[in-house]
Image (cartoon, rainbow, N blue to C red):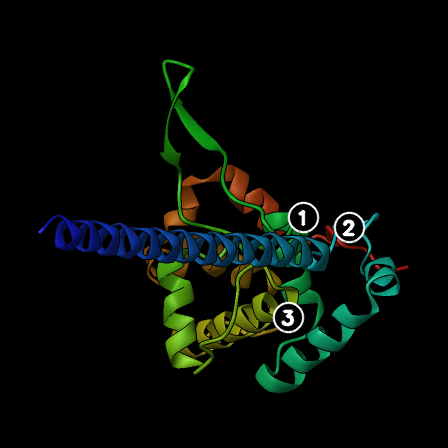
Amino acid sequence: MKKVQNIVHNTAKTIANIAHSQSQAKTRNLARKVASRISLIGIMAIILAGCSTAPPKNSANICEIFHEHRSWYDEAAKVRDKWGVPIHIPMSIMYQESSFKHNARPPMRWFLGFIPYGRASTAYGYSQAKTVTWDEYVKEADRFWVSRDNFGDAMDFMGWYIDKTHRLNKVSKWDGYHQYLNYHEGWGGYRRGSYKSKTWLVNTAKKWITGQKPMPHN
């Protein structure tokens, strides 16, 4: 009887040791998988950060911008050919909206000076497109793999917006003044004349027709 008890005890102990070893092995495998995924995420973050293009050194001059970022001209030319939009219109709007910063967004609002409670809008990226408008563009233009912090995608969005402004509100694609008012206020806001009570906005848009363009050519 005692021998049987010893056999049972030793068998149970062996099974426990095997289970413990298997558990440790699973734990080690899980740890390796987690570490591998964390490393992959870190590498992807570094790659994406490296892909971000710094703003032009002279963001007020379109010639120097394209000289510094030659691929930007190719993207702008694609938009011109696709949407029939003159290159200087979306480039100048982008200058006004984001100063060519890929991750530009409205400043954080603060309660009592130290409690953050969100940003003024969902505007983001080169074009400062709001989330709702960007989603509309994605569906209408059938472009689902696009990003607001990608220059080419942002330019295509602006081409789509300018083209739609022309169709909805009958504004020429070459009319920078009224195109900018539409871009800033939205199509409905423009029709309602919401810009008329915003002197600063009107003055900014007037740069298009007074010759004091924000992006002079050489």
Q: Which residue is mark 2?
A: 59
Q: Nearer the viewer, residue 114 or 1?
A: 1
Residue 149: x %, y % from top left: 58, 58
- Asked if residue 67 lies left or right of residue 26, the reply is right
Residue 169: x %, y % from top left: 41, 71
Q: How many marks?
A: 3
**Amino acid on which the number 1 mark rests in the picture:** Ser
Q: Which class describes the residues within 10 Å of circle 2: few (<14), some (14-19), or many (20+)?
A: some
Residue 204 visible: yes
Residue 205: x %, y % from top left: 59, 51
**Residue 24 has which mark?**
none
Q: Residue furthest left?
A: 1
- Asked if residue 154 lies left or right of residue 110, the reply is right
Image height of 202 relative to 26, above or below: above
Mark 2, secondary structure of its residue: loop
Q: Which class describes the residues within 10 Å of circle 3: few (<14), some (14-19), or many (20+)?
A: many
